[in-house]
Amino acid sequence: MTTAPAEGRLLRAAVLATVALGLVLPIAAGLWQTARAGVGVLPAVGATEMSLAPIRQLVEIPGFGTALRLTLVTGLGATALSVALAVGVCAAMHGRMTPRASGRLLTPFLAAPHAAMAIGLAFLLSPSGWIARALAPLAGWDRPPMVATVNDPAGLALMFGLMVKEVPFLLLVILSALSQLPVRQHLAAGRSLGYGRGLVWIKVIMPQVWPLIRLPVMVVLAYSLSVVDMALILGPSTPPTLAVLLLRLFSDPDIGLMLPASAGALVQALLVLGAFALLWGLERVGRAIGRWWVRRGGRGLSAEPGLWLASGLSAVLLATGALAMLSLLVWSLTWRWSWPGLLPDTWSLQAWSTPGSGWGAALGHTLILAATTTLISITLAIAWLEGEDRARRGRAGWAKALIYLPLLVPQIGFLFGLNVLFLRMGLSGGYIAVVWAQALFVFPYVMIALSDPWRALDPRLVRAAGSLGAGPWRRLFTVKLPVLLTPILTAAAIGIAVSVAQYLPTLFMGAGRIATLTTEAVTLSSSSDRRVIGVYGTLQAGLPFAAYAAAFLIPALLHRNRQGLQAGGAS
Amino acid sequence: MTLELHAVAVAPKAGAPLFPPITLTVRPGEVATVMGPSGIGKSTLLDAVAGHLAHGFALTGSMRLDDQDLAPLPAEARRVGLMFQDAVLFPHLSVGDNLAFGLARTVRGRAARRAAVEAALARAGLSGLYDRDPATLSGGQRSRAALMRTLLAEPRALLLDEPFSKLDAALRDDLRTFTFDHIQSRGIPALMVTHDPADGNAAPGPVIDLTQPENRS
């Protein structure tokens, strides 16, 4: 008996070794170092005795309890609301918009880095922002109202900011899950049995969608609970959320505070773990309730108004996000803008004309980092997928978990420990350390983006090439890569967007020596010169936009005479 | 050149074989036909012979081409051409470059290779279409181009996977004659799987019907 030969063993072994050493090891080692410091062992600052003192010290920090509460409320709240809105929009809009059109609508929101979006929102929502200016004549304000619309103590602005970024992401994830299900038939079947549209969605479609979106929802959950850059810009400051509190402790001149900070990083990791457990419990309970509900066969309740409410709120979110991006650009071109004018009194290119003031260097660093991390990640992703192809087998469950791992562990939980290791290896503060830390987050997104299109490639193309005498490498370079050019470039654009957006990895690993658009923008966001901040924000958002535009234009140009490669074309 | 299958069967891991063992000898210029309804594993049989069997399938029996055992060879070393229901031309290459992709390495030099491709295009009634986008060809043109691409690789045997079923009736007869003539003039064995009895009747060679009990031994 012969089985199919296992080709590409060497390739797969190399990929596995790279991922294990480059991705899993740093995260595990970083967590381990952080945990040790959390219980009092950090030889670098002379602490060698294991004790509970760091935890006690952490708990005694004024505002720690409030920080915990804020983190839970904003993180869980933003996630729950985002999921609800995204599901509602999908139920209301499904079938009314082509996947291509919705993809094009959502891409700008996905491309915009969190920090840029947060700065734009701060401009827009602040008492002197566009919204207040538009309301001023109606409300009779002759000066900006004294209301804390940004950095509010309840964290509402932070939740809003998170939702502006998360709803589009979840929409895209749900739409892609829906494309794998026979939604139309199930809707027809359900409605012919007397169930309303909204009820069919809740009782029939969503239970099928959930397993497909569980991991992305967990990513959103972990992110919302541990976000730093958005929380710095939009969140409350006294006390801030836990992640921001920890960042302050880590960057305090008193290095002794690194111990309670590490203990806090452990608390942060436990919070995320607890949230995952909560999600798991909710799923169990939901399943039981759902079954009981389905068996009762009730058809009465109409979910229609809820769906339209969700769509309306989402539209407001997206519109606010778009205005936020626009206000970055407008502020960067402003010279004078007096209250309550809707547009600047005088425009100027002043802020743009002085790259030497800092943004030139930051742009350079950002470009180098984005190009390097994306190139590494794309190469690794292609090697991984090609290895799967050559072994002619699908992906094991553990491999999928491996890809998601960096997105599920809170960054602040292991980056500090990792930096301790990098310091010992002499890497900290250099490009290698920053590229490595960023690639931990770029690779998963690139891999996730490329996997589905890669597997959707018509296997007969590759077989035809093989039967014509083309070996595995020729099949890869002359058939697969050219045919998959569009998804590869799209994955690269996503990689660039993720790299540009990285705040904490750049800050920690760069040891303050590698200033990028994002780290500079966050630092400047508390200053007063909106024109300069506007330049950084515009550049920060502009880079990913440019990458997406290139990913769209290059294949369109190269394949302009190839109908079979244009979306929707037959082979 | 002769293709010999002896008791060939394919089974998924820990599962029953997809079809009864097939024993078959195809002589040069012959087109052997394996008939059966869809879903019985006809395409999997061709995958096994061509070397594209997916992981998790086990192959029993022996396949010999010209007295050489095919099983240990990777697909690209078997020199067994494969023709699909849809032509499966590479969408990123022009029609001519598709043929050039197939053209054997033994033809050397830019001019000679170009001439070989042009000649093949002419034989298929596709003169002057070198630079065309394959997506703009008609179904019949695409199938002829795919056959030419396969033949330019100088295969030692040809596998046909329902090659005519997507074409309309008039075109089907034309293309059948065109394909079988080429196989006979090359003197290579061919193995065709189909669910269309007309394909089997027209093919110059033995016919095995997987649904007939007498073949299920």
Image (cartoon, coloured by chain):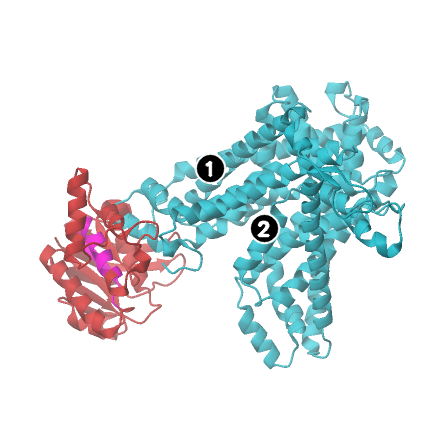
Chain colours: A cyan, B red
Using the image as rendered, state which of residue A56 and residue A159 is in the foreground: A159
In the picture of the structure, the residue carrying the numbered disc 2 is A107
Q: Position of residue B74 (x, y in %)?
A: 28, 45
Q: Nearer the viewer, residue A262 or A365?
A: A365
Residue B161 covered by magenta stretch: yes
Give the residue type that dot 1 points to.
Thr
Residue occupying image coordinates x 74% and y 52% = A78
Query: Looking at the image, do the residues carrying marks 2 and 1 touch, with CB atoms under 8 Å apart?
Result: no
Task: Identify residue for label 1.
Answer: A379
Q: Quadrant location of residue A501?
A: top right
- Tell me the element at label 2: helix
Horizontal relation, residue A338 to residue B18: left or right: right
What residue is shown at x 69% (from left), y 31% (from top)?
A520
Mark 2 or 1 closer to N-term? 2
| In this view, A528 is above or below A303 | above
Q: Compared to A26, does B105 lie above or below?
A: below
Which chain contains the residue that carries disc 1?
A
Looking at the image, residue A354 sits to the left or right of residue B42; the answer is right
Question: Can residue B52 be seen in this snapshot?
Answer: no
Q: Position of residue A15 (x, y in %)?
A: 47, 37
Q: Are marks 2 and 1 on the same chain?
A: yes
- Label 1 sits on a secondary structure element that is helix
Q: Residue flagged by tag 2: what amino acid is it? A: Thr
Quadrant holding the C terminus of chain A: bottom left
Name the one closer to the observer, B66 or A563.
A563
Report the Cα–Cα distance between label 2 and label 1.
23 Å
The count of marks equals 2
Q: Is residue B107 left or right of residue A398?
A: left
Q: Is residue B89 magenta?
A: no
A421, above or below A87, in the image? above
- Residues shaded magenta: B142-164
